[in-house]
Image (cartoon, grey):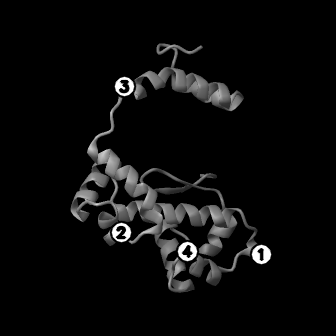
Amino acid sequence: MLTERQLNEDALMTMARTDAALCCQQLDSLLMPWFEQCTEDQHSKITRKALHHLDDSIISSLGEQLHCSQRTLERSFQRVTGLTLKQCQSMNKLEAMLEYLYQRSSTELDWAEIALNFGFNDQPHLIRYLKKQLGFTPKTYEKERGLTIDIYGGVSSISS
């Protein structure tokens, strides 16, 4: 068993690679006492509710859905996550699209259909969006495939 003194990044990484279930158990046993003492503040409650509705709602009507002012929702969300509602929604959309693309071969990719499925007006709109977010075109993405997205929406190639 890991103790607080033995908890270090290298040990956790090694354990996660060799026995992910044991690593989860160890982290749970160490962290659960702290989590059980935590209480959720109003900002966190609003943010948690917003996250459940964010991807299938229009941002401007989200406050009304959650029975609070739009301004309160936006301030609380940014305070808890460090992101705006729009940034988070955009990151979720990009992540879902990249996962969709990653699961298909190049021959299965119909960019016009993908544009419609992910709410873009047309294929050129999707291409501009991907160029802005990823830094390269969809055709380049087809060749690269290995991308990671960090918590702030930064995208990087796994092979880099």
Q: Could you tell me which secondary element the residue under label 2 belongs to?
A: helix
Residue bearing mark 3: 37
Question: Considering only order in the chain, which callout, 1 or 2, is on the residue closer to the N terminus?
Answer: 2
Which of the labelled discs sits on residue 160, or is there none?
none
Residue 144 position, x and y percent, is: 66, 63
Residue to which mark 4 is pinned: 118
- Measured as percent of width and height from the top left, residue 75 is found at 24, 55
Q: Which mark is residue 107?
A: 1
Question: Is residue 124 depicted above or below 22 in this figure?
Answer: below
Sequence-wise first label, 1 or 3: 3
**Residue type at the position of mark 4:** Phe
Q: Amino acid at mark 2?
A: Ile
CA separation in Å, label 4 and label 3: 40 Å
Q: Are marks 4 and 3 in contact (CB under 8 Å)?
A: no
C-alpha gap between disc 2 and disc 1: 35 Å
Q: Is residue 137 left or right of residue 145?
A: left
SS under mark 4: loop
Tell us which disc is closer to us: 4 or 3.
3
Instruction: Assess disc 4: are there few (<14), some (14-19) or many (≥20) residues with their C-alpha within 10 Å of its C-alpha.
Output: few
Identify which residue is drawn at 66% across, 67% down. Answer: 101
In the depicted structure, whether residue 115 falls above or below residue 66: below
